[in-house]
Image (cartoon, grey):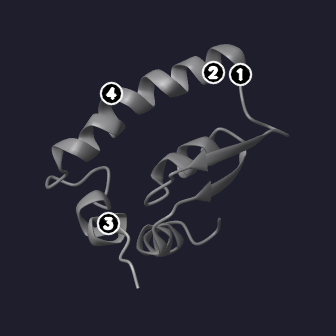
Amino acid sequence: MQTNQWDQLSDYFSAPENSSTIHADVADNILIAWPSFLKGVQLIQADGTHLQALDYGCGGGSFCNKLSYRGYSVIGCDSSSAMINIAKKKFPKY
């Protein structure tokens, strides 16, 4: 059985956003990419009410949570079952 490399990295990439131990690779997404992306989305669509979003490569689900907070109905998918399990634990209502 072939191991998914993202499963092996799931603990590394699943640090909470407000953690003092957040890794640089994760911080790059949370602090640089996400705000720019979300600003662009908001320029096109004020909110996501009645809209759907797909987060392909959702990892631990934090970006899905941000989209959901903005009103989108979000589906997160990831090739890593370990990351999906983390997302389900962090955000059980999705």
Mark 1 closeness class: few <14, some 14–19, many ≥20 residues within 10 Å: few
Q: Name the residue under label 2.
A: 42
Mark nearer the N terminus (1 vs 3):
3
Distance from the alpha carbon under mark 1 to that under mark 4: 21 Å
Q: Which residue lies furthest to the right in this view?
A: 50
Q: Give percent across and percent down for residue 34.
A: 43, 32
Q: Mark 1 points at which residue?
A: 46
Mark 3 closeness class: few <14, some 14–19, many ≥20 residues within 10 Å: few
Q: Mark 4 points at which residue?
A: 32
Left or right, residue 67 beside residue 73: left
Q: Which residue lies furthest to the bottom in this view?
A: 1
Q: Do the residues labelled 2 and 1 touch (CB within 8 Å)?
A: yes
Distance from the alpha carbon under mark 4 to that under mark 3: 24 Å
Q: Residue 27 lies in what quarter of the image?
A: top left
Q: In which quarter of the image is the C terminus?
A: bottom right
Mark 2 closeness class: few <14, some 14–19, many ≥20 residues within 10 Å: few
What is the secondary structure assignment of the residue under circle 3? helix
Question: Could you tell me which residue is drawn at 53 percent across and 66 percent down?
Answer: 91
Left or right, residue 43 beside residue 65: right
Distance from the alpha carbon under mark 2 to that under mark 1: 5 Å
What is the secondary structure assignment of the residue under circle 2? helix
Q: Give percent across and percent down for residue 30.
A: 35, 39
> Label 3 is placed on what type of residue?
Gln
Mark nearer the N terminus (1 vs 4):
4
Left or right, residue 94 beside residue 49: left
> Label 1 is placed on what type of residue?
Ala
> Label 4 is placed on what type of residue?
Ile
Q: Do the residues labelled 3 and 2 touch (CB within 8 Å)?
A: no
Q: Residue 32 lies in what quarter of the image?
A: top left
What is the secondary structure assignment of the residue under circle 1? loop
Q: Name the residue under label 3.
A: 5
